[in-house]
Image (cartoon, rainbow, N blue to C red):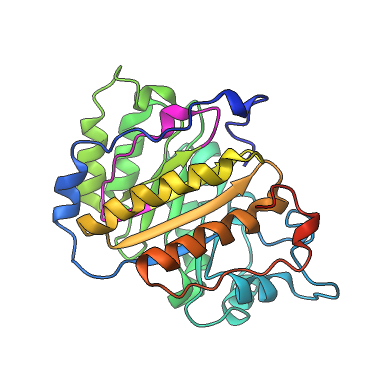
Amino acid sequence: MKFGKIENPEKVDFILPPDHKDNKTVLEKSKNGKPEIFIGCAKWNKSDLKNFYPKGTKDELAYYATQFNSIELNATFYNNFPVDTIDSWHDKTPEGFRFFPKLHQGISHWKRLKDAEEPTSVYLDHISHLEEKLGMLFLQLPDNFGPKNWEALRDYLEVWPSGFPLALELRHTAWYDGSWNSDHLYEHLEKKNITHIITDTAGRRDLLHMRLTTPTAFVRYNGANVDSDYTRLDDWMDRLKKWVDAGIENIYFFVHQNHEEASPLLSAYLIEKVNKEFGTDIKIPHNPNASKQIGLF
């Protein structure tokens, strides 16, 4: 994730802001129990995850799915894949694996949600072939899509089919800087059961709104290939513990890096902590060439 990249991340205050005051109300509505936790990377191709795959690996997704329980699928933002391809993704991944695909840019960036019924319908028809392995879709809107576009966003979400769990990532500063009444947004997301994505990246600390709208935490974490990437994950563990104690139902945490080859290492670090704290048994990914990777812990 190049979004939010800066030249001097060591100068950034990475302390997580406090929870939004309304999170307590959201989590009080949740069903108590052990949360489902999915942790993964954003991509599976070998060119991004250099040194992650053993020599001779023929099918990158098939191997990736032996190491992780999920993938944040950014490829579907750039391409409308044929059904045969999506069927193959389903068939080559094990039971319990989950995909978290991004909606196509034709919907979010070209149409900007207006008159987007047809491309949305086509997208959902295709992605539904992931069947039980479809986790949660997410809609990422462009940086220049701000509160002036509220009506387009509201209308699009109003007719979103409830059978497809959805998360929303907003990037325009004005959604969160107090210049617009964000209660309109939060109330609508809660009403439609749409999860509010939290983005943690060095250059855009304003996107750490810490406002949950469902009993699901969907976190897009962007490391900077520096030592603080790991202490930042320690802070996230403290926050996740708080949310689990409050009754959160799902945690979806996806790791990005400026140099993506280090993403499996960060993921492994977090998964080990999650397993120890919550008694889960999530597979800890093995990196056969870990000593060659950036950001080794």
Q: Residue furthest top?
A: 179
Position of the N terminus by quadrant: top right
Magenta segment's dominant SS is loop
In magenta stretch: residue 13: no
Q: Relative to 163, say whether 50 is above or below.
A: above
- Specify start and end residues of the magenta stretch as a single range: 201-217
Which x, y percent locates residue 81? Answer: 63, 63
User: What residue lies at 46% left-to-right and 29% top-to-bottom?
Assistant: 205
Which x, y percent locates residue 116? Answer: 45, 46
Residue 116 appears in the rendering: no
Q: Nearer the viewer, residue 208 or 117?
A: 208
Q: Nearer the viewer, residue 102 or 290?
A: 290
Q: Nearer the viewer, residue 88 or 288?
A: 288
Q: Nearer the viewer, residue 94 or 259?
A: 259
Left or right: residue 203 versus residue 88 is left
Left or right: residue 38 versus residue 67 is left
In magenta stretch: residue 204: yes
Left or right: residue 18 versus residue 200 is left
Q: Residue furthest right?
A: 56
Left or right: residue 44 versus residue 120 is right
Which x, y percent locates residue 155? Answer: 30, 41
Q: Relative to 234, say whether 32 is above or below.
A: below
Q: Relative to 78, say whether 200 is above or below.
A: above
**Number of numbered callouts drawn:** 0
Residue 82 appears in the rendering: yes
Quarter of the image for residue 186 reads: top left
Q: Relative to 96, say whether 295 is above or below.
A: above
